[in-house]
Image (tube, grey):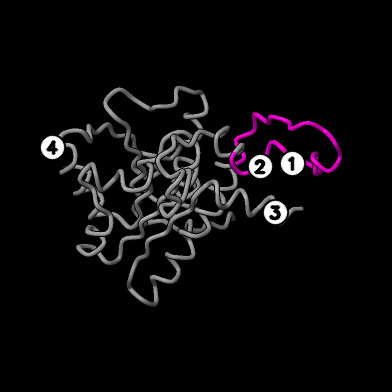
């Protein structure tokens, strides 16, 4: 007789505003663990047109909302206030500019866990407004100069890597942080605000490896 078991995040509701890789990957992992994940796309569809979206958005309910309209913002806010976790990967402050201030929404729903995955940290005044594509984050973090062994010390030129290392590391650490926050919420009854800047964590990972 086969033993059956319930996935650990059954009953957890997630709203995923992520685009490209990092945010959707976190939503994908939470969905794999049993969470109900609603992925939000703009009316024109995903910003990243790639076959990878089929994998990154598995186990999700797909919904298109126009966040440039008052109606769309109201619809998104209602979804957030019914959720346990909200994921976003915009530049710091952009959610609030659109009318979805997660600090204010967490006051309305203290149990909410808000996960932000920007390219650069909100306190990085020089770079937080940059469009943080994979190559920009990798270049700014010194990854291309240190692929594998330390190429600079070996006298080898910098090497470009097409691998989405920032998003891969970011999704792994952000997903772990959210699960820890869920566990902590069982005791405190309070959510959390988590920021995982891709550039900061990638730099720390490579410094640790060296």
Image location (x, y in percent) of residue 140: 59, 40
Q: Secondary structure at mark 2?
A: loop
Of the two numbered discs 2 and 3 on the same chain, state the one appearing first in sequence.
2
Residue contact between numbered discs 1 and 2, judged by CB atoms under 8 Å? yes
Crowd around label 2: few <14 · some 14–19 · many ≥20 (10 Å): some
Few, some or many residues within 10 Å of mark 4 (<14, 14–19, 20+): few
Marks 1/3: CA–CA distance: 10 Å
Residue 155, x across and y down, in percent: 85, 36
Location of the N terminus (image quadrant): bottom right
Q: In the image, what residue occupies the spot 55% across and 51% down?
A: 200
Element under label 1?
loop
Reading the image, the residue beneath label 1 is 146
Q: Is residue 116 left or right of residue 165?
A: left
Which residue is at a point 50% across and 53% down the rendered structure image? 174
Residue identifier under label 2:
142
Of residues 100 and 92, the one nearer the viewer is 92
Q: How far apart, in angstroms, are the residues tagged by discs 2 and 4?
A: 43 Å
Q: Position of residue 41 (x, y in %)?
A: 32, 32
Say which residue label 4 marks: 71
Q: Secondary structure at mark 3?
A: helix
Q: Judge left or right: residue 203 versus residue 7.
A: right
């Amino acid at each position: 007789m086969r033993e059956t078991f319930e996935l650990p995040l059954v009953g957890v509701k997630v709203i995923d505003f992520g685009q490209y890789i990092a945010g959707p990957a976190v939503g994908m992992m939470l969905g794999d663990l049993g969470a109900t994940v609603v992925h939000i796309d703009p009316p024109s569809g995903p910003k990243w047109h790639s076959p990878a979206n089929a994998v990154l958005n598995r186990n999700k309910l797909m919904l298109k909302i126009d966040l440039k309209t008052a109606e769309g913002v109201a619809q998104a806010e209602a979804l957030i206030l019914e959720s346990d976790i909200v994921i976003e990967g915009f530049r710091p402050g952009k959610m609030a500019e659109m009318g979805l201030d997660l600090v204010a929404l967490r006051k309305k729903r203290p149990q909410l866990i808000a996960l932000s995955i920007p390219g650069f940290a909100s306190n990085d005044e020089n770079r937080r407004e940059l469009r943080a594509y994979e190559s920009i984050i990798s270049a700014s973090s010194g990854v291309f100069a240190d692929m594998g062994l330390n190429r600079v010390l070996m006298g080898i030129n910098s090497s470009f890597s097409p691998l989405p290392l920032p998003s891969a590391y970011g999704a792994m650490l952000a997903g772990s942080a959210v699960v820890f926050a869920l566990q902590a919420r069982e005791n405190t009854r309070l959510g959390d605000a988590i920021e995982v800047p891709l550039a900061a964590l990638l730099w720390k990972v490579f410094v640790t490896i060296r």
